[in-house]
Image: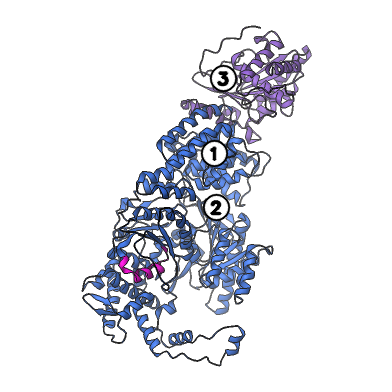
């Protein structure tokens, strides 16, 4: 019987980390291990398996990404060691599956167990154990259950589902009295599996959703029943810790949950809502910043909530459409920030009916404009209601400013480094070498050095263009695109699994998709991707590139595509029917889709008027998207070296240092308000967009929070996260002050009026509901007053007829207004 | 029939295997093949896996399973090779199976404080059996030589799982760490491992006995060359007047 610490020492003594890296390089095809090396490796792993199998059931490693790391490294190495050879190695998968489960990583255990089941030569016990683990509902009493195990299996299953201590005790007795007999006759592999099973049983109890949620006292039993019917009866370790140690289900306290991707944040948000809503405060809100994410959350929640008489409503549009929620019956609203903003603007009187508001992807507050909407919403709720605020993010650091703003004590921040899948980050160099790093996964290795090296095709070992001439830039861009496409194709060939290529512009998504598709074979005619291509050709004949790419299993995804196409593409991605997808960050940031590899086409994007390195938090969020739990055991992010288009750009050595500094070994990054960032950047267009968004949030705040007279502007700025940063508050105050001064003098289109305190006029309330800035509202008012419906010009008429394009006078009028006045409606030119 | 020797008074203790290599065990227990068959049949009837209702045909697999069972059951009670509480036999789950499971035939912990791991391989032949000692395939030589090479399935490392599992559920977790250290990465690195080859065979002529003796000596020499120590190696043969008749009698008695 050994302790987790002793296992770590054993792993260090036997060089487990190096072995795991060696196997990782081998399964990627970067090295070929000779038979003798495999044999040595297998023996070492098996020796460590003996150690892991003799861990005490009552002192298993804490699943926190640190204490459990040696066991996780062993599991990964084992799962990669099953291969076709002259002797049987498939039992490595069975050992890995149970060891993963023993490490409380049931999602990966399930995946590996499914792989183990694909081999025919399994003993009855092995087949049963693998069938149980691969089944999300964890049904122990099943067809494959060996007769000698049946009684125990029934008792264990019933204990997991009831969560009752006495039931676990009964299962304990049945297991230990049976195991003494079974162990006498088990073959060596079964015996080892039985040792692990004893540990796995402990995890059944410690992670039993029923036990944990019943103990909390704040979750109705009917909801627990519905949860067990729709998802695994076990919680993730992160979820168990959030509830048991951090008291997440305490309905009063605000919470910040910062857990890696695929560790169950969404369910925690849902549980926080369920624990908070009451008859007096019957509204719960779950904000998901992307439509696809909102849909995903809504589908999961709806069934469960209906079991406890709670209505689940989805709101994912913008500022238009009705919002019929009565505020009396228990309702959970799953909404995009825009839709919820619209809801609050329309129904401010419901402020005191909101029990809890969950902000998913909370780090979004760093992003220009959208971030400000999140910030404004949270500020409004903080000031004008007593709703509980729960913030979720995979990447946020709990800085002092953030905790102060959210009114959370540091000891109540729910954080963990536990991840069900391994994260690998590679830098593809111009010489074709790929340096693989495994951040945070070291027990004795040197984190400064690459964990292993690979080779990738890099047809153009380019540096930055010498001059900014158009033709030189074009050649340069093509060379970069070829490099990225080659790496993406190489990664797809190595894994035969989906690859996401991350582009920074919509144009780049199209270019890359076209280039990549030329390296793949035509799909069968009845392939769903080709079926979609036919439909796109019919319904959207102007889209040429996308259907051509789909014929080869490739797609691009960006905000310019119609919604229905994006949704269909997301469906194909979810079913892993597309080989490679190139997309802008919008897809990669929000939705949990199964990609094995993310290839970064560029590491810079336009921000505040200039090209800047992609922020560390954004990169970490995107990198966390590959290797979804339950779909893969690990996820790779490959940064393809891109010298950029600036002739004076840094050379490769300097870029490499940047990659390491920003993405491989970054310093802790505190979240910053998008307002303070824009103020510091001091770039005209960004400030113009910021001002519009601030004014829009300001009038929403006035209507919702009803600040005292004379305090309107200062209360608003104090409600924002920006108030935590020097300089930002005074900027916000100056913007709102200038707007108030100017608009109070506008007799034609007044948005606000002095009404002790400031209040919205009838026109102002109309503007409020549009979500636009009041200046834009005023501009539109003036435009409509003078609008006379321009007639269709003769120029281009025949072309329009030929392509079935209709002339819309209002659109034409708006276009003309924008052309004439740069400040007409800021939102129309910024796209926000 | 001689009365069986008394059950070992030691708990969890294995006896040193007495005598020199190849000394025949059968004669120490009973005076005739028939007596041995009756003892074995009785053990088979007492086993949890009930004998079939009618006598099965004796094929190679059944022959192997029955002799492995004989070595496991009688080896504890009569030959004092080990204590069965501390031994684990791959095919003990059902001696009547139509096939045999892969793996080391019997593993046992021996000793009182400093434990050793006894690896027992059983072979059975209807002839003199020398070819099962040093032959190319499925011989004691291939089994023992393969302990640290070749197929991973047969490695001692993973077989230790059986022992650890047995200890865990018999409430002897205190022995786990000691047991894990018994097996190293090579024979010379594994002084805690002992090898015991048991051959069930036909008594045969003096020439047959000599052939067997020479095979045992040859195998011992091969194992010494590959790093094993002399004290780690022992062989025994169970010589029967007529192996076929012995099995027939055993099966008939057990299924009666």
Q: Which mark is on residue A278? A: none
Q: Position of residue A701 (x, y in %)?
A: 30, 71
Q: Which mark is on residue A141? A: 1
Callouts 1 and 2 in the same chain: yes
Chain A representation colour = blue
A715, above or below A407, in the image: below
**Where, by quadrant of the figure, is residue A830 drawn?**
bottom left
Please name whichever residue, A468 or A319, is drawn nearer the observer in this view of the structure: A319
> For the point 57% across and 89% down, which residue is it?
A797
Q: Position of residue A630 (x, y in %)?
A: 53, 51
Alpha carbons under labels 3 and 1: distance apart: 33 Å
**Residue A338 among magenta residues:** yes
Label 3 secondary element: helix
Label 2 secondary element: loop
The mark closer to the camera, 1 or 2, is: 1
Q: Which residue is mark 3?
A: B84
Q: Position of residue B64 (x, y in %)?
A: 70, 24
Callouts 3 and 1 in the same chain: no
Please name whichever residue, A827 or A306, is drawn nearer the observer in this view of the structure: A306
Span of residues in magenta: A334-350
How packed mark 3 is, by other alpha carbons closer than 10 Å (few <14, some 14-19, many 20 or more), is many
Chain B representation colour = purple
């Amino acid at each position: 019987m050994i302790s987790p610490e002793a296992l770590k020492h054993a792993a260090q003594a036997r060089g487990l980390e190096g072995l795991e890296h060696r196997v990782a390089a081998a399964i990627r095809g970067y090295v070929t291990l000779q038979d003798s090396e495999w044999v040595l490796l297998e023996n070492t792993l098996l020796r460590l398996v003996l150690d892991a199998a003799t861990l005490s059931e009552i002192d298993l490693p804490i699943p926190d990404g640190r204490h459990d790391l040696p066991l996780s490294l062993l599991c990964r190495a084992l799962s990669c060691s099953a291969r076709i050879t002259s002797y049987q190695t498939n039992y490595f998968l069975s050992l890995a599956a149970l060891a993963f489960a023993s490490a409380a990583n049931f999602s990966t255990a399930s995946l590996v167990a499914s792989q183990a089941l694909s081999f025919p030569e399994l003993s009855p016990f092995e087949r049963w154990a693998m069938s149980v683990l691969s089944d999300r509902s964890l049904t122990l009493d099943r067809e494959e259950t060996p007769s000698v195990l049946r009684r125990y299996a029934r008792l264990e299953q019933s204990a997991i589902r009831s969560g009752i201590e006495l039931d676990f005790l009964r299962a304990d007795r049945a297991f230990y009295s049976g195991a003494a007999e079974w162990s006498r006759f088990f073959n060596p592999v079964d015996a080892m599996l039985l040792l692990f099973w004893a540990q796995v049983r402990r995890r059944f109890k410690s992670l039993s959703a029923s036990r944990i949620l019943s103990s909390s006292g704040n979750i109705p039993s009917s909801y627990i029943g519905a949860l067990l019917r729709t998802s695994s009866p076990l919680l993730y370790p992160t979820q168990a810790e959030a509830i048991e140690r951090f008291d997440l289900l305490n309905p009063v306290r605000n919470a910040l949950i910062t857990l890696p991707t695929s560790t169950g944040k969404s369910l925690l948000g849902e549980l926080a809502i369920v624990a908070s809503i009451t008859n007096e405060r019957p509204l719960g809100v779950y904000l998901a910043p992307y439509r696809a994410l909102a849909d995903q959350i809504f589908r999961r929640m709806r069934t469960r909530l209906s079991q406890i008489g709670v209505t689940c409503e989805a709101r994912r549009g913008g500022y238009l459409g009705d919002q019929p929620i009565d505020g009396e019956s228990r309702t959970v609203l799953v909404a995009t920030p825009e839709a919820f903003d619209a809801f609050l603007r329309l129904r401010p009187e419901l402020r005191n009916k909101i029990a809890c508001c969950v902000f998913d992807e909370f780090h979004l507050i760093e992003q220009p404009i959208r971030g400000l909407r999140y910030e404004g919403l949270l500020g409004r709720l903080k000031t004008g209601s007593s709703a509980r605020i729960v913030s979720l993010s995979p990447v946020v650091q709990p800085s002092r400013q953030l905790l102060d703003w959210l009114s959370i004590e540091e000891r109540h921040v729910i954080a963990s480094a536990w991840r069900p899948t391994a994260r690998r980050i590679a830098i593809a160099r111009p010489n074709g070498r790929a340096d693989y790093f495994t951040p945070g996964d070291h027990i004795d290795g040197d984190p400064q050095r690459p964990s292993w090296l690979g080779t990738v095709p890099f047809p153009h070992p380019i540096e930055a263009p010498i001059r900014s001439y158009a033709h030189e830039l074009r050649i340069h861009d093509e060379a970069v695109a070829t490099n990225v496409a080659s790496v993406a194709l190489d990664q797809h060939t190595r894994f035969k699994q989906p690859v996401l290529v991350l582009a920074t512009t919509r144009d780049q998504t199209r270019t890359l998709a076209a280039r990549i598709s030329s390296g793949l074979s035509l799909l069968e005619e009845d392939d769903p991707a080709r079926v979609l291509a036919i439909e796109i050709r019919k319904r959207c004949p102007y889209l040429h590139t996308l259907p051509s790419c789909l014929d080869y299993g490739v797609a691009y995804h960006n905000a310019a595509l119609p919604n229905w196409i994006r949704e269909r593409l997301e469906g194909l991605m979810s079913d892993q029917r597309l080989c490679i997808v190139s997309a802008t960050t919008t897809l990669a940031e929000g939705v949990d889709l199964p990609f094995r590899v993310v290839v970064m086409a560029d590491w810079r994007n336009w921000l505040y008027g200039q090209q800047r390195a992609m922020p560390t938090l954004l990169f970490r969020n995107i990198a966390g998207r590959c290797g979804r739990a339950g779909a893969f055991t690990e996820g790779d992010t490959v940064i393809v070296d891109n010298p950029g288009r600036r002739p004076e750009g840094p050379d490769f050595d300097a870029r490499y240092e940047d990659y390491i500094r920003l993405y491989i070994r970054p310093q802790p990054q505190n979240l910053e308000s998008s307002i303070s960032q824009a103020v510091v950047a001091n770039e005209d267009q960004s400030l113009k967009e910021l001002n519009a968004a601030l004014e829009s949030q300001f009038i929403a705040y006035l209507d919702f929070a009803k600040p005292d007279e004379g305090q309107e502007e200062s209360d608003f700025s104090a409600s924002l996260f920006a108030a935590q940063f020097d300089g930002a508050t005074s900027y916000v105050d100056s913007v709102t002050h200038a707007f108030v001064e100017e608009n109070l003098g506008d007799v034609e289109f007044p948005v606000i009026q002095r009404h002790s305190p400031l209040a919205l006029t009838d026109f102002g309330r109309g503007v409020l509901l549009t979500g636009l800035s009041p200046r834009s509202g005023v501009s539109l008012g003036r435009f409509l007053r003078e609008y006379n419906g321009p007639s269709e010009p003769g120029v281009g008429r025949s072309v329009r007829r030929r392509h079935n394009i209709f002339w819309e006078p209002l659109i034409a009028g708006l276009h003309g207004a924008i052309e004439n006045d740069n400040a007409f409606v800021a939102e129309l030119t910024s796209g926000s | 029939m001689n009365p069986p020797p008394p059950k070992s008074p030691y708990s969890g203790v294995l006896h040193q295997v007495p005598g020199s290599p190849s000394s025949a065990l059968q004669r120490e227990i009973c005076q005739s093949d028939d007596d041995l068959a009756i003892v074995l049949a009785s053990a088979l009837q007492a086993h949890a896996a009930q004998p079939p209702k009618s006598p099965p045909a004796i094929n190679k697999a059944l022959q192997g399973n029955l002799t492995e069972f004989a070595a496991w059951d009688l080896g504890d009670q009569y030959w004092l090779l080990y204590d069965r509480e501390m031994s684990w036999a791959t095919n003990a789950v059902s001696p009547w199976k139509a096939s045999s499971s892969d793996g080391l035939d019997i593993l046992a912990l021996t000793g009182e404080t400093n434990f050793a791991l006894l690896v027992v391989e059983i072979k059975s032949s209807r002839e003199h059996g020398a070819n099962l000692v040093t032959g190319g395939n499925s011989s004691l030589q291939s089994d023992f030589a393969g302990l640290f090479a070749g197929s991973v399935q047969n490695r001692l490392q993973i077989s230790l799982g059986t022992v650890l599992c047995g200890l865990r559920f018999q409430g002897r977790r205190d022995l786990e760490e000691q047991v894990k250290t018994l097996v190293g990465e090579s024979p010379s690195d594994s002084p805690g491992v002992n090898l015991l080859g048991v051959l069930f065979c036909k008594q045969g002529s003096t020439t047959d006995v000599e052939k067997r003796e020479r095979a045992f000596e040859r195998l011992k020499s091969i194992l010494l060359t590959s790093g094993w120590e002399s004290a780690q190696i022992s062989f025994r043969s169970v010589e029967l007047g007529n192996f076929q008749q012995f099995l027939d009698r055993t099966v008939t008695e057990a299924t009666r």
